[in-house]
Image: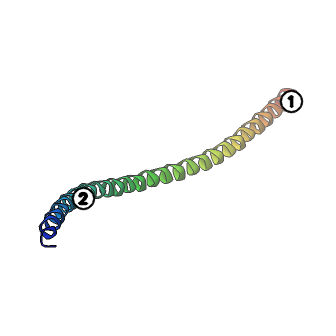
Amino acid sequence: MTSLFPKNFFRIQENLKVLELELQETRDDLGICKSLLERKTEELKNTRDKLKEVELERDQKSYLVKKHTKTESKLTGEAGELLNTVVDATSNLEKMYRKLDRKT
């Protein structure tokens, strides 16, 4: 049995070295993944911040378009009223001139 002990011991030692190398490779991979995750997390934060800015700009533009549309609608209605007033005034003037022409 003493002759088997050194063989097993050296085999176990070799296995341990292999496992230590694999563990170090795994740690290195973990470090790379951790760095990548941190970078992607920062990119995601920046993207979310940019998205908030874009959404705010969109909402502001939407608000302005809505208000401009409402103002244009009011102005169109007022222009129609002014046009009707001008048509009525023109009609009244024509009636007045015809009446004056009849009197003269």
- Check disc 2 and report the residue beneath it: 26
* Secondary element at image label 1: helix
Between 100 and 90, which is closer to the camera in this rendering?
90
Q: Which residue is at 57% across, 51% downward?
A: 67
Under tag 2, what secondary structure?
helix
Q: Is 57 placed above or below 83 here?
A: below
Residue named by callout 1:
103
Give percent across and percent down for residue 25.
Answer: 21, 56
Quarter holding residue 7: bottom left
In the rendered structure, the answer to whether residue 94 lies left or right of residue 4 reads: right
- Structural distance between the alpha carbons of marks 2 and 1: 112 Å
Coordinates of residue 62 in the picture (x, y in percent): 53, 50
Residue closer to the observer: 24 or 64: 24
Residue 54 relative to residue 32: left or right: right
The image quadrant of residue 75 is top right
Residue 55 placement (x, y as % from top left): 46, 53
Q: What kind of residue is marked 2? A: Thr
In which quadrant of the rendered image does the N terminus lie?
A: bottom left
* Residue 80 as seen in the image, left or right of residue 30: right
In the rendered image, the residue lying farthest to the right is 102
Instruction: Identify which residue is drawn at 22% across, 58% down.
Output: 22
Give the quarter of the figure containing the C terminus: top right
Q: Is residue 71 above or below residue 1?
A: above
Callout 1 amino acid: Lys
Q: Is residue 46 left or right of residue 65?
A: left
Give the mark nearest the N terminus, 2 or 1.
2
What percent of the width, then of the height, locates residue 74? 65, 48
Residue at coordinates 11% horizontally, 67% vertically from top-left? 6
